Image (spheres, helix red, strand yellow):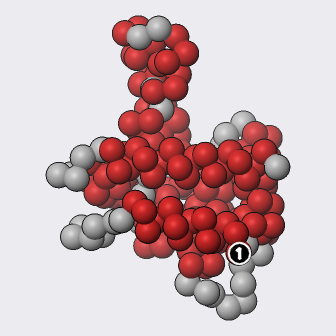
Amino acid sequence: MDGERISFEACLRQAFALYKDHFLLLLLTHITLVGVSVFSLGILAGPMMVGVVRIVLGLLDDRSPSPQPGDIFDGLRFFLPSLLLGLAVGVASAVAARVLGLLLIGPLALLLGPILPLAATVFAFFMIAERGMDFRPAGRGSSRYSGRSRGWSPSVGRFRCWGCWRFIAASY
C-alpha cells in the first residue's frame, strides 16, 4: 500500500457497482453490523467491521463460495486487534469531538470531531482483515497511508462516502 495511488472516482464507481450487484447481501450485513454493535454496547463493533470488510473483499475477489450475511461473524477471529482498534478510534473520536466542542459551537463539533480519527484509520480494518495485522501496526500503517503527502482530503472523502453508504444501507 505504500506506493499506491487510489483514484477516488474509481473507488466510488466500484462501490456503486458492488452495492448494485449485491444489494441484499450488503444490506443484511450492515443491518447485522448495526444490530450486533448496538446490542453489545459497541464491544463487538470492531470485530463486526472486520467481518464486513472480509465480505466486501470476498465480493471484490469473486471468492467461491460467495459470501453470505452470516460471514460477518468471521470478524470474531480477529477479535482482540479489531476490538482494540475500535476502542482506540472511539476514544480518539470522543476526545476530538470534546476538544472541538470547546473551540466550536456544539453540533458542528459533533459532526467534525470524529472525522479525523476515522479518516486516519480508514484502512486499518482492511489491514487487519486482509493481512491479519495487530491493531497498532494497522493503525500506524493506515494513518501513514492516509496522511502522507497526499493530504487528508481523499481519506476524509472516502470515509464520508463509506459512512453514507453504510447509513443508507442500514436505514432501509
Q: Is residue 140 visible?
A: no
Q: Is residue 6 left or right of residue 80?
A: left
Q: Is residue 59 visible?
A: yes
Residue corresponding to mark 1: 21
Q: Count residues near mark 1 (Cα–Cα under 10 Å), then give few for <14, some for 14-19, many for 20+.
A: few
Q: Is residue 12 left or right of residue 28?
A: left
Residue at the (48%, 32%) spot, across then down: 114
Q: Is residue 141 left or right of residue 101?
A: left
Count up the numbered dots: 1
Q: Up-down: is 119 above or below 111?
A: below
Q: Up-down: is 128 above or below 86?
A: below
Closer to the camera in the image, 89 or 155: 155
Where is residue 128? Give x, y as percent. Answer: 47, 64
| Quarter of the rendering containing residue 64 | bottom right
Q: Is residue 4 left or right of residue 131?
A: left
Where is residue 161? Give x, y as percent. Answer: 53, 49
**Amino acid on which the number 1 mark rests in the picture:** Asp
Where is residue 152? Give x, y as percent. Answer: 30, 44
Closer to the camera in the image, 80 or 156: 156
Where is residue 60? Give x, y as percent. Answer: 56, 78
Closer to the camera in the image, 51 or 56: 56
Closer to the camera in the image, 80 or 27: 27
Quadrant of image for the N terminus: bottom left
Work out which residue is located at the far bottom of the displayed protein and give it: 64
| Quarter of the rendering containing residue 141 | bottom left
Work out which residue is located at the far left of the displayed protein and give it: 149
Residue at the (61%, 87%) spot, across then down: 62
Q: Secondary structure at mark 1?
A: helix
Residue at the (80%, 61%) spot, across then down: 28
Residue at the (61%, 71%) spot, across then down: 17
| Quarter of the rendering containing residue 69 | bottom right
